[in-house]
Amino acid sequence: MGVTGGVAWEKSAMMGARVKSGEEKAQAVRESTMNAPLVWRKLYSKAVTEGVEPVSGEDCYKVVVTPAEGKPETMYFEKKSGLLVKVNTVAVNQMGEIPVDISVSDYRDFSGILTPTKTVQKAGGQEFSITLQSVKVNEEIPAGRFEPPAEVKALVDKSAPRAEKK
């Protein structure tokens, strides 16, 4: 799955290739924004601090953010460090809505960028864990690295408005 040129898409063995739209697309665009903490005002129309709650024994600010399109998300920021440690959201997809809990931890500095190296996501009775070993900053990215698969490109081309003949 990915977002390329404003098009949110996915390709899976079960559902095949498809282009996302509506709330599902809006969520995919937010999730793919690499600098989201810096541009949160563009991603969310409202942010409200609802108090302090413990997460893994540490006091955290509970902040509910509401996007212009989509469900509110609850984010927990550690009081001592200010770092994000947990997110509760609802994933929207073609099969419905699924509550998702995401925990991030083990922040490390990679070339001056503080990055969580461990992410645990719980959704639909499953748990996924991602551990980063390294992060490269300002590396050259090969052309075409983020191009969608041919099946997705065909769907995008098919739905693009046709230029009128003169």
Image: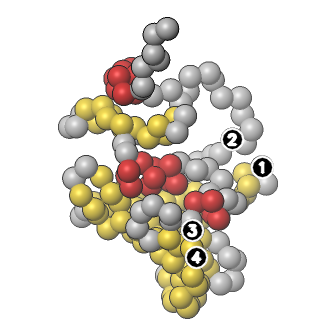
Is 123 or 15 nearer to us in this picture?
15
Marks 2 and 1: CB-CB under 8 Å?
yes
Task: Kindly identify which residue carries mark 2.
Answer: 136
Task: Kindly identify which residue carries mark 1.
Answer: 111
Give the residue type that dot 2 points to: Lys
Dot 3 alpha-carbon crowd within 10 angstroms: few under 14, some 14 to 19, many 20 or more: few
Mark 4 or mark 2: name the one nearer the start of the chain. Answer: 4
- In the rendered image, residue 109, in percent from the top left (x then y), is placed at 72, 57
Task: Kindly identify which residue carries mark 4.
Answer: 47
Indicate how the structure is coloured in the image.
secondary structure
SS for callout 2: loop
Separation of residues labelled 2 and 1 (CA atoms):
8 Å
Marks 1 and 3: CB-CB under 8 Å?
no
Q: Residue furthest right?
A: 112
- In the rendered image, residue 111, in percent from the top left (x then y), is placed at 78, 49
Which quadrant would residue 139 be assigned to in this image?
A: top right
Which quadrant would residue 77 be assigned to in this image?
A: bottom right
Is 49 or 111 nearer to us in this picture?
49
